[in-house]
Amino acid sequence: MGDLFLGLDCSTQSLTALIIDSEKKNLIHRESINYENDLSKYATSSGIIMGKSEQEIHSYPIMWIEALDTLFKRLEGKQILLSKIKAICGSGQQHGTVYLNNKFETELETLDPSQSLTNQLTRIFTRETSPIWMDSSTTKQCQEIRQVLGGKTNSIKKLGSNIIERFSGPQIRKFYQEQPSAYDKTEMIHLVSSFMASLLIGKNAPIDYGDGAGMNLMNIDKKEWDEDALKATAPNLKKKLPPLVDSFEIIGNISKYFSKRYGFSANTKIIAWSGDNPNSLIGLGLIKKGQVAISLGSSDTFFAFMEELSLDLRGEGHVFGAPTGNYMSLLCFKNASLSREKLKNSFDLDWVEFSQILDQTPPGNNGKLMLPYFFPEIVPLVLKPKVFRFGFSKDDLKENIRAIIEAQFLSMRLHSQWIGEKPDIIYATGGASANKSILQILADIFKIPVMKFNVTNSAALGAALRAYKSYSDNVNKEEEEWGIIIKDFLKPQKYLEIKPRTQYGELYDDMVKIYERYEEAVLKGERAPEKLRLEFIKKYF
Ligand code: ADP
Ligand code: XUL
């Protein structure tokens, strides 16, 4: 056994650990704590809690802390040699914020290894819950910040994204406006990623450029906190934020608490954590211009590696820092796995039955079309959830199942056009990428092959690879190239390639145009152009 490297992923629904062996170049262990099932005392539904309105969606940071202790306990119980781990890196669901008081650092420094983290870290929060990426309750704050920054185009040019409901800045502003005294008592605001990294190093950890770009607070060009954005968001904000760093930086050694409690070497290096999407970029091996991936997890994301900064001035896409030091583009869809699951459960199906229906129903769904806003949507922006069905009803089993999957990928194809270059392959990851029938529809609609790796948690794998590279570069002083790492660790993981069925190419070209017109009509509150759908039915069915 060679040196081991650990990648963690604190996602919406679970905390996952992947351990890789640097000598054998393979994955040696995977462990996951599911919040809903393993930490049921928090009574979350898929890791989330609903707020006062359907736009308000939070989670418990204390639950993420407990997940970390529980995960390490499980690894220890399975005799995993934690002392052989040389470096740990991590991934967090993006945008979510954690609000801490002035006791946070002292409590971390004085943790007693004989007791659990949750017993000791109860008095560190100024806000018991954290707004997460699914929250879309800050439209008012977005408008206020955007206006001060001189409008949408100026905001995008400065920050890499329009001012967006789920991004940290508008969420921080809402907290400041609604609970000013709790805001005043807040000494530090972390992202999920930097919060988890802080636990590991026993003091406040920095935020990396990848996740920092998802806050509406970081200047995308200079990679510094943007003074205008800080001022437009809330008073004294700069003092409450950790510094920004490169994604490959070693931010410290593991704290005494973890080395004493679980037997990690005191020398274990902790690498700056990043967002799940930047980590996935690496976990899928996207290091060249034009390479594209789709993650089908709690959120569905479409992302691509970018050599140089290029912006979506229409405002739907975002630009984040990539762990390689370059950039990545990203589109995020909220009606993703949880919507697929909602529909599946409403018909009392399991995934096998769900997939059988997809395999048995015709591409184009006999002209039945859905706009699937089971939850408020991010792309396109829909704040009030509503599912629109054309040509079928909510009780038509087969039509609904095929319609949601076709709608999700038609929308993705439509809204990703700004990224420009047409890729020749799509890499797929996330929980739902285990489903071949879903991936077939993805390949058919995008008209290119879909490649899937064995590991579906590319964020945790990306974090493990980042830990390996930073350690090799900075400690062993052996500059490892990303190209070589990917060839060594990822190529053997290639698992499945699904080819598009070219006979459906024209049908989906037509269908995406119809989808666009229906979406436009629905968003404007106009009547759908049903004539188009009837012509489509006449042509193909
Ligand atoms: P996260 O983004 O929180 O890390 P995951 O990537 O682990 O989430 O994805 C979890 C989701 O995967 C579940 O919500 C579930 O709906 C979906 N999923 C798991 N297995 C299948 C399957 N066979 N077909 C479709 N979806 C699946
Ligand atoms: C990206 C986004 C989600 C979260 C949760 O902008 O909001 O993908 O990172 O996975």
Image (cartoon, grey):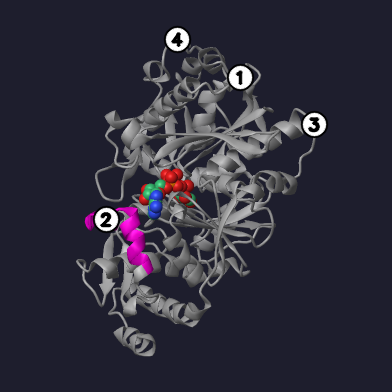
Q: How far is mark 3 from mark 4, CA to CA? A: 36 Å
Q: Mark 2 touching mark 4, by CB under 8 A?
A: no
Mark carried by residue 282: none
Q: Nearer the viewer, mark 2 or mark 4?
A: 2
Mark carried by residue 83: 1
Q: How far is mark 2 from mark 4, CA to CA? A: 45 Å
Q: How far is mark 2 from mark 1, CA to CA? A: 44 Å
Q: Mark 3 touching mark 4, by CB under 8 A?
A: no
How packed is label 3: few (under 14 Cα within 10 Å), some, or many (20 or more)? few
**Residue picked out by circle 4:** 114
Tell me the kind of residue under disc 2: Leu
Mark carried by residue 349: 2
Q: Specify the quadrant that holds the N terminus.
A: top right
Characterize the magenta stretch by its predominant secondary structure. Answer: helix
Q: Nearer the viewer, mark 3 or mark 1?
A: 1
How packed is label 1: few (under 14 Cα within 10 Å), some, or many (20 or more)? some
Could you tell me which secondary element the residue under label 1 belongs to?
Answer: helix
| Percent coordinates x, y for residue 292 in the rendering | 59, 60
Could you tell me which secondary element the residue under label 2 belongs to?
Answer: loop
Label 2 vs 1, first from the N-terminus: 1
Q: Residue at x 48, y 62 (%)?
A: 316
Q: How far is mark 3 from mark 2, CA to CA? A: 53 Å
**Residue picked out by circle 3:** 477
Q: Nearer the viewer, residue 129 or 45?
A: 45
Label 3 vs 2, first from the N-terminus: 2
Look at the image and give the residue range highlighted in magenta: 343-359
Q: Mark 1 touching mark 4, by CB under 8 A?
A: no
